[in-house]
Image: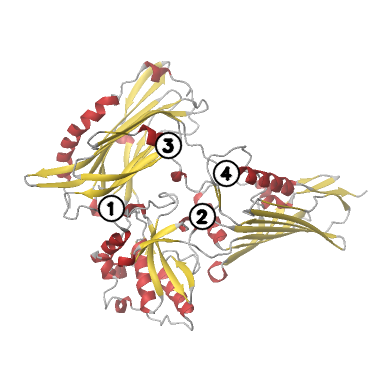
Amino acid sequence: MMKLFSWRISILCIQILFIPVLCQAQLVFGEYSEEELALEIVSFEPEAKIVALYEGGVSNPIVDAQPGRVSVLGIATQYHYRYKILHDNVLNFGDIRIPFTRGGDLNLEQILEIQAQVSYLENGQREVRVLSDEDIKLVKLDDGSAEYRLIFPNAKKGSILEWKYVKLDRVYYSLEGWAFQGTVPKLKTMFSLLVPSFLKYQLVVQGAQVRKAMQVSDERDTFIWELDSVRSFQTEPYILNPLDYLDRVEGFLSTDLTQQNSIVYSTWEELGTQIQSMKAFGSYFKKNSFKKINIEDDLTGATQLETAKNIYAFVSNQFELMPTVYPLPTQDFNSLLKSKKGNHLDINLLLLVVLQQYGVNANLVMINQKGENRTNLIPSPYLDQFSSSLVRVVIEGKLFWLDGTAKDIPFGLISPNKLMPKGFMIDGANSSLIPISLAHTSGFEIEIGLGKDSVNNLVYQNSAKIFGLSVQSLKEIQLNQEQEVDEEYSAYDVTFEDSFLEKEVVQSIYKLQIKESNDQLMVLTPFEQSIFFDNLFIAETRKYAVEFEYGFSERISFRLDIPEGYELDEYPESKSISMGSNELEFTFQVTDNDGVLTFESKVLVNQSEIPVSKYKDLRRFAIVVSEQLNSPIVLKKVH
């Protein structure tokens, strides 16, 4: 294990190497220009409430040079941030978090030399407060990560918050890089990478202005980016993964001349073979490993599919997921059996072994996960782009995807954030990138009628059915978001039946109040529950593709038995529309059965991603659908 004093000795070398780059444009900590002090508005983004006056980073491998031997101990990055609050601090800006990965005793990352201060206005005078240890807290998290929390006092309009630190990372084959774009505008953002001649990194540069700004030394050992007046990232509805669009640079090691094999991973086949040669990985496939699992009940079913379902249920319920950013196994087979806890690869390796022992055709596939990395894989054998895994199963020619960490998800379904375009199948010399396609039926149906509540008021009586991936999407939204509740339109008298694991469906019966009603008219808008009721595509232009999580359907049916004392005054007519190539389809059908009217709306999302070139067509479609679903059904009081 690398000793802490080795890190500190290396810092001396790093600081010397940093000097040529830092002197080009580095700010002096705590010294502010008249322009920064006077700034009240960002000219290129005047609505901004916070601005980054400066962001800078410099990365450099940590080198231990001994006579006749050179080794790389890790990589160090100096960070320097300077922000100003321009408006009343409605965003509560001032609680800054510096995350890093501890990895238990490995100490994969360390944060050193934190400095922080705030310059603020008090009675018209500029004051400075340097943050003390009481303002800087270390918080250890359950997943092996940690963070320093910088609590800035006096974070208010006119305040300048500044902090800097050094991150030491033992993993030097992956470059965390730099995000030049974020949630606030930046007056200046800089990043430099210094690389010794015996290392070569393959850089992944995202964004036209980042590619244009890149400066490279003749020796290709220094890379510098300096961008001015960078707008904040402008989010749009239905963007699943902003990381796909942010202006940023990252990279991975391609050549390391300090090692016997200087090419890190030349092919996917080589990467797969290397992973399988790991001691922890191989421990799952030893001849006697399966016998140690101690399966009390025979998992053999009447068919191979039933057997696979039994195995999936056994593994997913017996072993607990311990979240980690590490892409490889964290323990060997025996340790997993003892602890009953593991990361995604530990558990899915076990699932793979049991399936294969029962004769099921199965392979391990590594994936990246939405929100943790880019959606589309870098087409080079770069290990750190993977953060999760799946098991690919083929039974009687039919393809299934399994995740042994997801005990609350039915056999053959996976979490939507793991539904990626491609994954890396690990199969020795046959290891390769393969497409991930999931056959599923997802969406929801709602049957609505008029009924009466306990106090004899007319209400909407709803019977809803949610199925497939839409169930998991709803659960994740409820888990991750705090939504404001509309008390006038919240469900009550709710009953719930969860058959998700058995039938991939959940059902609910509930009542909703009728919003608009008076002595003369009752205005009904039963389709307000549709996700297309509010049109989110009102902007005339769009910069990024529209991304639905997956294809799905939505059907809402309203049966109108005209209540006694009312007559029908107004209602929408039937209508249908589709996009040019049927990417989305909409039908609204009105039928009359002996005076009982039924209004049925159906939307089909047949293509999950709509390119920018088809946005105008989508916008026209969405306007028509929203207007139709908003069209009221009006009942008039009979005198």
Foreground mark, 4 or 2, reads 4
Q: Which residue is mark 4?
A: 613
Q: Quadrant of residue 563?
A: bottom right
Foreground mark, 1 or 3, reads 3
3D distance between C-alphas at marks 2 and 1: 27 Å
Residue type (three-letter) at the residue carrying disc 1:
Gly
First in sequence, mark 4 or 3: give its number. Answer: 3
The crowding category of the residue bearing disc 3, from other C-alpha atoms within 10 Å (few below 14, some 14 to 19, many at least 20), is few
The secondary element bearing badge 2 is classed as helix
Q: Which residue is mark 1?
A: 103
Q: Which residue is mark 2?
A: 476
3D distance between C-alphas at marks 1 and 3: 36 Å
3D distance between C-alphas at marks 4 and 3: 19 Å
541 to the left or right of 335? right
Q: Residue at x 33, y 25 (%)?
A: 129
Q: Which residue sits furthest left?
A: 67
Up-down: is 323 above or below 44? below
3D distance between C-alphas at marks 4 and 1: 45 Å
Tell me if residue 560 can be seen. no
3D distance between C-alphas at marks 4 and 2: 31 Å
Residue type (three-letter) at the residue carrying disc 3:
Ala
Up-down: is 310 above or below 472? below
Q: Which residue is mark 3?
A: 208
Q: Residue at x 6, y 45 (%)?
A: 67
- Camera-side residue of 27 and 475: 27
The crowding category of the residue bearing disc 2, from other C-alpha atoms within 10 Å (few below 14, some 14 to 19, many at least 20), is some
Q: Residue at x 58, y 57 (%)?
A: 551
Q: Quadrant of residue 104?
A: bottom left
Residue 292 % position (x, y)? 29, 77
3D distance between C-alphas at marks 2 and 3: 34 Å
